[in-house]
Image: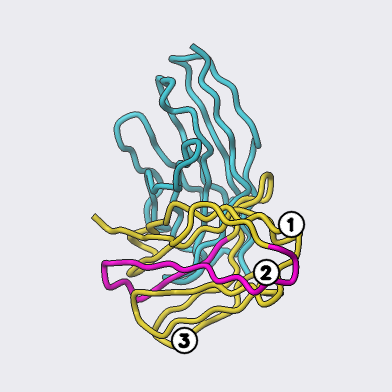
Chain colours: A cyan, B yellow
């Protein structure tokens, strides 16, 4: 099955700085890459996703990039704010209904 | 807005007990999933179902079974609870992955 690795496991940034989380996947046939945000005590929620036929996607302060050749994708958060503090999970899908998740990155935004 | 409801937020059970975790979704999603979440291990797939009465093993099915008798309900069963099954259990549903999952709020199960 698909194996997704996520780095770093923890990330501390100063408010206003950028944060970058990187994930690699094992199966070149994977074609869908979502990112989830889980605030403390809450359920994971989809924040952005990208398909394999797209190299980059942006939504306000967050963006995702995909490098199919290298089999890695990244989440970029610009101008970080305290409400960006959360655990972020990347995921990859080989087919259209099952996701394999990374281990998660705990992001802390320092005021 | 899609709602995925898990029957219990917190649960404490004794070793050896049979445990039922219930999940209900209200958006006619075909796919339903059970994950467990442990620190440093992320979300690991236990079982999933892509249709009524259909089920497939995920990455860590040992010690668990599932039931999907109706489209909106997906139950996770711990046949004989053990302490290593203490975890956060998350249910999710989707039409297709391309639209992402919707997760339930989770059930924190403690087996003593």
Cα–Cα gap, marks 1 and 2: 21 Å
Name the residue beneath numbered marker 3.
B54
Dot 3: what SS?
loop
Residue at mark 3 to residue at mark 1: CA–CA distance: 32 Å
| Residue matched to label 2 | B60
> Which corner quadrant holds the N terminus of chain B?
bottom left
Which element type, helix, strand or loop, lies under badge 1?
loop
Marks 3 and 2 sit apart, C-alpha to C-alpha, by 18 Å
- Label of residue A71 in the image: none
* Front disc: 3 or 1: 1
Q: Residue furthest left?
A: B1
| Residue drawn where x is 61% and y is 60% of the image | B44
Mark 1 residue crowding within 10 angstroms, few (<14) / some (14–19) / many (20+) = some
Residue positioned 67% across, 69% down in the render:
B60
Instruction: List x then y, in percent, for residue A110.
Output: 53, 15
| Label located before the other in sequence (3 or 1) | 3
Residue B17 appears at what percent x and percent y? 68, 71
Residue B11 location, quadrant:
bottom right
Q: Viewer-proximal residue, B95 or A73? A: B95
Q: What residue did someone put label 1 on?
A: B112
**Residue B19 highlighted magenta (yes or no):** yes
**Residues rendered magenta in the picture:** B14-35
Q: Residue at x 44, y 51 (%)?
A: B105
SS state under label 2: loop
Q: Quadrant of residue B43?
A: bottom right
- Assess whether residue A86 is covered by the magenta stretch: no
Question: Which of B8/B27 is in front?
Answer: B8
Local packing at callout 2 (Cα closer than 10 Å; few below 14, some 14-19, many 20+) is few
Identify the residue at image location x=32%, y=69%: B95
Provide residue A54's location: percent of width, then percent of height.
37, 52
């Amino acid at each position: 099955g698909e194996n997704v690795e996520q780095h770093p496991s923890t990330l501390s940034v100063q408010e206003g700085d950028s944060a970058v989380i990187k994930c690699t996947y094992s199966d070149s046939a994977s074609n869908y890459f979502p990112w989830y945000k889980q605030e403390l005590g809450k359920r994971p929620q989809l924040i952005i996703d990208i398909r394999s036929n797209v190299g980059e996607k942006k939504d306000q302060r967050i963006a995702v990039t995909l490098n199919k050749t290298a089999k890695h994708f990244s989440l970029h958060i610009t101008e970080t704010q305290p409400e960006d503090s959360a655990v972020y999970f990347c995921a990859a899908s080989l087919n259209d209904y099952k996701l394999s998740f990374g281990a998660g990155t705990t992001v802390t935004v320092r005021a | 807005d899609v709602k995925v409801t898990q029957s219990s937020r917190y649960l404490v059970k004794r070793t050896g007990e049979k445990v039922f975790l219930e999940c209900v979704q209200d958006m006619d999603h075909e796919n339903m999933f059970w994950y467990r979440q442990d620190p440093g291990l992320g979300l690991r797939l236990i079982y999933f179902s892509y249709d009524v009465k259909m089920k497939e093993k995920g990455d860590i099915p040992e010690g668990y079974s599932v039931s999907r008798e109706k489209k909106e309900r997906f139950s996770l069963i711990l046949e004989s609870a053990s302490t290593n099954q203490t975890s956060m259990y998350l249910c999710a549903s989707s039409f297709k992955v391309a639209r992402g999952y919707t997760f339930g709020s989770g059930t924190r199960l403690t087996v003593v």
